[in-house]
Amino acid sequence: MQVVSDIASLKSIIEEKKQKGLSIGFVPTMGFLHEGHLFLMRMAKAENDFMVISIFVNPLQFGAGEDYEEYPRDLERDTKMAGSAGCDLIFSPTVKEMYPPGYATFVQVEKLTEGLCGASRPGHFLGVTTVVAKLFNLVRPDRAYFGQKDAQQAFVLKKMVEDLNMNLKVIVLPTVREPDGLAMSSRNKYLTPEQRKEAVVIYRSLREAEEQIRKGEREAGIIKENISKLILQAKHARVDYVEIVDSKELHPVSIIKDRCLIAVAAKFGKTRLIDNVLVEV
Amino acid sequence: MQVVSDIASLKSIIEEKKQKGLSIGFVPTMGFLHEGHLFLMRMAKAENDFMVISIFVNPLQFGAGEDYEEYPRDLERDTKMAGSAGCDLIFSPTVKEMYPPGYATFVQVEKLTEGLCGASRPGHFLGVTTVVAKLFNLVRPDRAYFGQKDAQQAFVLKKMVEDLNMNLKVIVLPTVREPDGLAMSSRNKYLTPEQRKEAVVIYRSLREAEEQIRKGEREAGIIKENISKLILQAKHARVDYVEIVDSKELHPVSIIKDRCLIAVAAKFGKTRLIDNVLVEV
């Protein structure tokens, strides 16, 4: 496995693989890898000849007052983990390499980015689409892999690839969870032991929503209220949003039908966690 | 030479050429080809194995009240001319093929797009960068060719390619002129015979500016005033802008030094024409 941090080295390795006709699988990450990332990597490795990950905490997708500075970083640990998942190449650039002085180009997906995390975190998705467009152009993957945990991100990136006619396939894989159901996230590290115990309430509330729907409930308002109520039973929890949206345009629905996404963002102390389930009726 | 209008056909032809390891030269156009386009095409043909042009009058780069509807279109004529310049493939999509319902992704280059034509035509460059990003992703060229006549466009597209790490080279070739010096443009067709005669004043004013600078004048204000005065001697002329900017950030300069761009936009009746020269002192 190689680890490169400069664009020139990355490009020359990618060009060599392309010349050989190898297919490239790509997993963009912000590092501090967990089992969710490793799952994406193993699938990327299985479905492609050459598997690349990027590790880059992208300042552009963090808002003022968010956790850009604190975001956990550990390249040595990440390198070992990526190697164990069959990674062939890690691209781990500096901020200056990705955004040199005078940087001025941005990719914006409208509409899909307006609600959910886009509403809570203005500018977040502009940062995500811009950095991922750059990484796609650099790595030139045949397939790129993302987790369902960041559901809106997956929708937005699929839309970007489709709209800009990018020459790759975006593949979204199921959320990997801790044994108690909490969605894997690098941010789980921030939680105090007490908050960590409480945080499981997010997924429990989503499971309960699924159960309500299975039993026939179709009123989004009732289901959302129940989710909020459950989450707020946790002492340190604050709800950022609880939303039920259609699975095409991510517009809030009042009556559940066809395929819907139930999405939650909640804060435990200063730590903001998200999770979601897709339901089909 | 092939002419295709759907993305699927284009992609399959490009994929086939890429598989064979052929280099691709690309000239994006809005059609109604003239000798300026043909010059770009001949160079693209000479420097690459396979030469592609696009013909697409891009609604996204026209503002309200501009000439999107009237813009001249003649695919039959264009096809013959492109063939004569060695074109291998014309991609001539419909608006719906490029911007299907629900289209929502845009590429924005900031700063460089603020002055000159960007100030006169809000949203113009957002339309240019978005469509060119799409075309680059579809055609996957090794080299793309643009004319110096649209100087700001060339700067902006180079910046987009650099910032987004697109895998191609932007090549800018000198403006091709009519025998009397008027820069070739599809919009010259709009001019009445009288306006056409008058329009040569644009290039004459730029030549005179070059002459002033050669003689030692360095005050941008004096040179700009002289250009405006000359242009306004033409009965049907109105000046949109006369600007002298540095050749890196396109910021207006007050004293001419190093490399500067002298850029003019003027209207003859309803027809807006642009031209420029690069000067080095």
Image: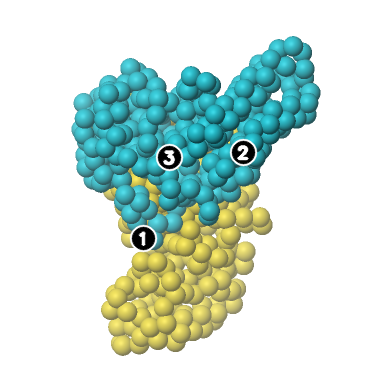
Chain colours: A cyan, B yellow
- In the rendered structure, are the residues bearing label 2 and label 3 in contact, judged by CB atoms less than 8 Å apart? no
Residue at the far front: name it.
A194
The residue labelled by disc 2 is A236
Instruction: Determine whether the residue tagged by mark 2 lies in a helix, strand or loop.
Output: loop
Q: Is residue A47 or residue B209 the one in the foreground?
A: A47
Q: Is residue A97 or residue A190 the one in the foreground?
A: A190
Q: Is residue A54 visible?
A: yes
The residue labelled by disc 3 is A132
Instruction: Determine whether the residue tagged by mark 1 lies in a helix, strand or loop.
Output: loop
Instruction: Determine whether the residue tagged by mark 3 lies in a helix, strand or loop.
Output: helix
Q: Identify the image quadrant of the N terminus of chain B.
A: top left
Q: Chain of mark 3?
A: A
Separation of marks 2 and 3 at Cα, in angstroms: 34 Å
Q: Residue at x 33, y 83 (%)?
A: B213
Q: Residue A170: horizontal and vertical position, in percent?
A: 45, 27
Residue at the far top: name it.
A215
